[in-house]
Amino acid sequence: MKTNPILYSFFVVSLLLGLSACSDSVLEENPTAFLNVDNAFNDQAGFEASLTGMYVALRDELYGPVEIIKLGDMMVGTDIASAGDPGILFFNNYNTDVRPESGLVTNLWTWAYTQVLPIANAIIENIDNIEWDDEADRNAVLGEARFGRAYAYNVLVNVYNGVPIVDELAASPRFDFTRASRLEVLEFARQDLEFAAQWLPNVPVLDGRASSAAANHLLSEVYISLGRETGDASFYDLSVQAASRVIDDPSYALVTSRFGSAVDLPGDYYADLFKDGNQDRSSGNTEVIWTYQHQFGTPGGQSDSQGNAWLRAWGPRFFDARDPNNLRAFILTEDSIGRGVGWLRPSGYWIYDVWDDPNDIRNSPFNVRRDWFYNNPESEFFGQQLVPHEFFGNEYRDTMQHIYPMIRKIEGDLLNGPTTGRTFTDAMVMRLSETYLLRAEAHMLAGDLAAAAEDINAVRARAQTYLISANDVNIDFILDERARELIIEEPRRRTLARTGTLVERTRRYNTLEETRNTIQDYHQWFPIPLSVIEANLEVELEQNPGYD
């Protein structure tokens, strides 16, 4: 397993809460045994360690103590996924599950305001505590911190709409936060990203670190949002320019040939992107822009009981399926499939409707496992293909949790055993194919459908599927293409929210009738968590419409 210095220097950063700087004399200590605002920024190594803490916090967007929700709440209850596990009923009924008091609506708020933003702000606020030998070094560190801050705010604004802008550490507890408008939050993120794009290197200095390409990729999205919010078409031109800076950089290219750890095994180049060790530029992956890092058995690389839980979340609970004689149909083996639980089940829309070309390699057997064969030697059906919707013993089980086509992006080496349902595969947060689709969206909104089709066709040509014309381009086609290309990788709820299509597409495509019938127009945004509103004692923190 590879090693990465970014995770060797993991610290439990005590900057997570701005409240740590209380003025009571009993707290006026200067501890030196751990990082804090008094000793973290005395040299460049302290800034580097704090950046590492920020990246660990950013990774917790998806992984951590509430991974089941973090992995699912940006995907389940949308057009692409429903909850498969009947014991996990989130987003089944929007009216009861998505409430200001619901735990699921607090997770990203807490992640941003108590993990990412305090560290990023501390770095930014203390950047001139030391004398830097080179202004470029200073601005690169500052650029990474501003990138992390902008990333967090872009998440927040596409989940909750307008949110409070906190750009400094609090010297004492605050109870007077006010919400900025959506436009103000986007403008704040834009300024951070423009600085980061100017000062960061075009490729990351280490796998998992930000680069100017990552900043420009995110800038392209933020400019689109600014254009939608203001009606100013010049933002679409800026989006095209930001995306083009990445696409035109010779350091980045769509992968079109076999590479990496599985190159000698049956497969295709799209499947290679998701094989163990292939997510980072050091593997020869020219398409990846930014990753969340996992290292088995490495301090800070996720505990051995955690890791990447994609497999556990998205994989069907096949090991619990029964044959017609009520024996287990499958047994777990030491391969790359592991113990899925079926927390999230792809919708019928994704499993069937978006695939209109059998040649599309993204739907090849190397990328979607549609056929299942009994592997329990004690079953008389051993070696035979299991047919979905057949009887299992005395109980008819549908395919919501136990058997359904499995997206093979989730597979990987089961370094902690097959029962954990976790791999230690790095997660690609940004890929060049998405940059093309962002630029296509900007071209479409600017009215240049031919240029939009050209960008979409770059992605489709790589997938070996038919090309489209300008007449085919609309937001639904782009969202369908994103579903084909970016399933699991894409925080789908945020994409649909920022494009104003969440409610309509969920009603049209979600598998569950209850979900389709209960989602309301105001569910485009999460409510502001009730606990946050109640804690803001000095100023009323406005709730999103529909949740009062």
Image (cartoon, rainbow, N blue to C red):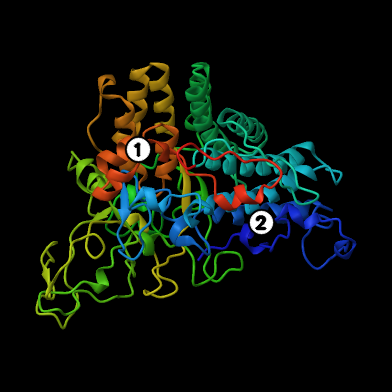
- Give the amino acid at mark 2: Gly
- Give the amino acid at mark 1: Val
Give the distance between the C-alpha atoms of the residues marked 2 and 1, in whole angstroms.
36 Å
Q: Which comes sooner in the sequence, label 2 or label 1?
A: 2
Query: Which residue is at a point 55% across and 71% down the rendered structure image?
Result: 297
Q: Which residue is mark 1?
A: 503
Percent position of residue 167, x then y:
71, 40
Query: Which residue is at a point 74% across and 43% down the rendered structure image?
Result: 168
**Quarter location, residue 457:** top left
**Quarter location, residue 542:** top right
Foreground pick, 232 / 11: 232
In the displayed structure, does residue 13 sit left or right of residue 489? right
Percent position of residue 342, x then y:
31, 62
Report crowding for label 1: few under 14, some 14 to 19, many 20 or more residues within 10 A (C-alpha).
Answer: many
Query: Which residue is at a point 84% across and 65% down the rendered structure image?
Result: 31
Residue 467's mark?
Answer: none
Q: Which residue is mark 2?
A: 53
Instruction: Check disc 1 and report its element: helix, strand or loop.
Output: helix
Q: Does residue 451 appear anywhere in the picture? A: yes
Q: Does residue 207 appear anywhere in the picture? A: no
Instruction: Check disc 2 and report its element: helix, strand or loop.
Output: helix
